[in-house]
Structure formats: structure tokens, C-alpha cells
Image (spheres, grey):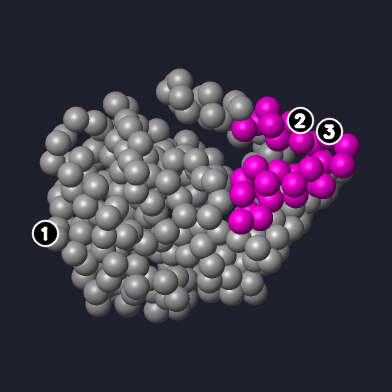
Amino acid sequence: MSKLPITVLMITKNESYHIADSIKNLSDFASEILIVDSYSTDNTVDLALSLGAKVIQRKFINFGEQWGFTVNSEEISYPWSMKLDPDERLSVNTKNEIKRVIEEDLYDGFYLRWRLWFMGKDLRIKSKPLLRLWKTGKCNFSNKIVNEQPVVNGKCRNLNGFIDHLDCSNLHQWYSKQNLYSTLEAKSMFLNNKNDFKNHDYRFSFSKRNLLLKIYKFMPFKNFFLFLYLLFIVGAIKSGKIGIIWASLRVEVYKMRNYKYIEMKFNNQPYSPPNEPLGKPNNNAIQTK
């Protein structure tokens, strides 16, 4: 297929395991790939540049702030923007569907579903649509520490296509990632970050999620019921043993986040993950503050 007038946007930090395959997956699809890298210490930037991506190096503050910078970057050259992570892939059918709706030009943004792969297996769990494609200039992000969400000013609709989320290469990497995210989520809970956007659909989903989290905190046998919910309502049981492992580990992540939140409350002080070392600026990348 001919390349579409899309700039694919990514943020990275030490993504050398995924970045080459990610860019190659988009080589027949996107006219431009713009990466905002948080000074990786591996060869993420070199790989991305060698494969034709445009790279900006910028210090990381939090996910919402980094994405807010990225979607408003003056380096975006095309009328459509798409948010992807380095561990996500698009199928031929999804690319063709995106091509069709862009040519129709009836909407300002589009949602795609997420297909999660865990331990090399498609979990076949239920997933809510994610807002990932929009007209450039019509999107912004809440300034949240983690679990940032895009908000598009305009009409949006769901697509049938999937984004395949390959997640981590192994469980060692998965545990490290969950340790990081659970700390950030606990800190966000402690600081009680508020979404200040006025988009009705977004406010509803944000409020509903917060309400469920509050109910979850006070439920008796909550971890057992969460495990059953992930197995039978979300559908992890359909993937057999790997689905059961995933559901069990997700419960552990919830517990980890809540224990960290309790620790912060006991000490009346939030904390952040330890600062990771920063790589050197790359002469071929765009440098910004």
C-alpha cells in the first residue's frame, strides 16, 4: 500500500528490543515516524535514525507531560497523527481500514481495540477501544503521571481493527515494568491528580474508573473477586494456563500498587522510582529542553 499522510508518534527509553521491528512494521504505512526519546542508554536512537525515523531527545518528566509535548511538536509534518508504542504492531487489515477512513475524511479521530500478547500468546481478552488516531492539532493529553489519555476536539468513531500489543519480551522485563508503573500509579493516587479536561465522554470514563477503584479498596475478599473478574468477565480463562497466570499476576500488581499507596499515606510522602541514568545526546537527533 502507498504511504498515508500520517505521522506516527512514539516516546521511548531503552526500546532497542522493539524499535527496529516497530519501524519496519510501519514502513509501508506512515509517511513519517517521530520519536521523542528520553535519552536512552542503549542503541534505540541509533537504530531509529538508521531506519529513517525523526528523533527528538528530551528529558522525561511524566507520561502525560511527555505525550503533551509530542502531540504538539512542530516537527509533525502530516495532517494525521497516530500514537503507538514501540511494542505495538498494525496488521495489513488494520492499515487498510485506516487508509479508507482517512480518505473518507468524515471524522476527527478514531478508536482502535487492543489485542494483548503475553508470554508469546494472544490472550483474547476483552479490551476497550483506545483513541489512537486523530487530525494533527486536534489532540491534547492530561498532565498525568501515568495512564495518560488523549482528548480529541472533534467527532470520533470506533474502527474494527486491532493494535497488537506485544508487551515485554519475558517475565523478568514484565516484572520490572510493573514495578515502575505501580509506583507511579500509587504516587498518582496519593497526589489525587485530577483531569481538567471538559470532554464529556472522557470525564465519564475517568469518573467511572475512579469509582470502581474506590469500591475495590473497601471490598472484602477483593483480590479473589478481581481474579475471578479477570478470568471470566475479561476472558483470560479462554487462553488456558497462560491466561490464569496473567490474571494472577494482574492481581499481584493491584496489590503492589495499593501497598505502595498505603506506605505513602503512612509516611505522608509520595516517592518516585529511582532516576535511571541518561544516555548522551545523539548528534543526529533534535535536542530540546
Name the disc covering residue 218, or none. 3
- Residue located at (45% from left, 20% from top): 200
Q: Nearer the viewer, residue 281 or 89?
A: 89
Is-magenta flag for residue 127? Answer: no
Picture coordinates of residue 170 (x, y %)? 59, 74
Residue 211 lies, in percent from the top left, at 68, 27
Q: Where residue 59 sits in the image (x, y, percent)?
A: 45, 58
Relative placement, left or right, of 156 versus 228 is left
Q: Secondary structure at mark 2?
A: helix
Q: Residues within 10 Å of mark 2 (few under 14, many from 20)?
A: few
Read off the residue under disc 2: 215
In the picture provided, is 95 more to the left or to the right than 244? left
Q: Say whether residue 202 is visible.
A: yes
Please rate how many residues cluster around mark 3, counting C-alpha atoms within 10 Å: few if below 14, some from 14 to 19, many from 20. Answer: few
Tell me the residue that label 1 is attached to.
Answer: 2
Q: Nearer the viewer, mark 3 or mark 1?
A: 1
Label 3 is placed on what type of residue? Phe
